[in-house]
Amino acid sequence: MHMEDEKREAVLQRLRRIEGQVRGLQRMVEEDRYCGDILDQISSVQKALRSTGKIVTRNHLETCVTDALRSGDAEAAERTYDEIMDLLYKQIQ
């Protein structure tokens, strides 16, 4: 992955925070907490993951995808377009 150190650290910090949220969810289930509260926390984790995914997606577009398209290799460009379409469809499902 081609990611600047500052951006990589920001993504890692977000993922660590999400990891803490997931541990909190586990505790909530273990403590037999109210289902609505658990669902709220699940929603928060999903939002945090989507936000982190947005950062990684942009980085991928700015680096790997841009490099492949600028290479002048038509086959590489076609593979890159297919990859982007697959990734985008996974994100919206």
Image: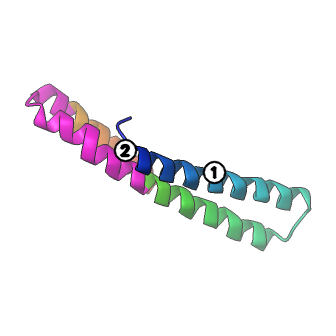
Residue displayed at 89% across by 56% down: 30
Marking on residue 53: none
Q: Which residue is mark 1?
A: 16
Residue farthest toward the front in the current orientation of the protein: 6
Q: Foreground: 22 or 88?
A: 22
In magenta stretch: residue 71: yes
Q: Nearer the viewer, mark 1 or mark 2?
A: 2
Q: Is residue 40 left or right of residue 2?
A: right
Residue farthest toward the left in the current orientation of the protein: 72
* Residue 73 in the image: above or below residue 3: above
Local SS, label 1: helix
- Amino acid found under the numbered disc labelled 1: Arg
Q: Are marks 1 and 2 in contact (CB under 8 Å)?
A: no
Q: Is residue 23 left or right of residue 93?
A: right
Which of the 4 image quarters holds residue 21? bottom right
What is the CA distance from the residue labelled 1 to the residue labelled 2? Answer: 18 Å
* Residue 13 in the image: above or below residue 87: below
Over which residues does the magenta segment extend? 54-78
Residue farthest toward the right in the current orientation of the protein: 31
- Specify few, some or many for label 1: CA neighbours under 10 Å numbering under 14, 14-19, or 20 or more: few
The picture places residue 15, in percent across and down from the top left corner, at 58, 50
Residue displayed at 33% across by 48% down: 59
Local SS, label 2: loop
Which of the 4 image quarters holds residue 25? bottom right
Residue displayed at 55% across by 61% down: 48
Residue displayed at 92% across by 61% down: 31
Q: Is residue 31 left or right of residue 52?
A: right
The picture places residue 71, in percent across and down from the top left corner, at 12, 31
Q: Is residue 11 left or right of residue 46?
A: left
Q: Which residue is mark 2?
A: 4
The picture places residue 20, in percent across and down from the top left corner, at 71, 55
Q: Foreground: 67 or 10?
A: 10
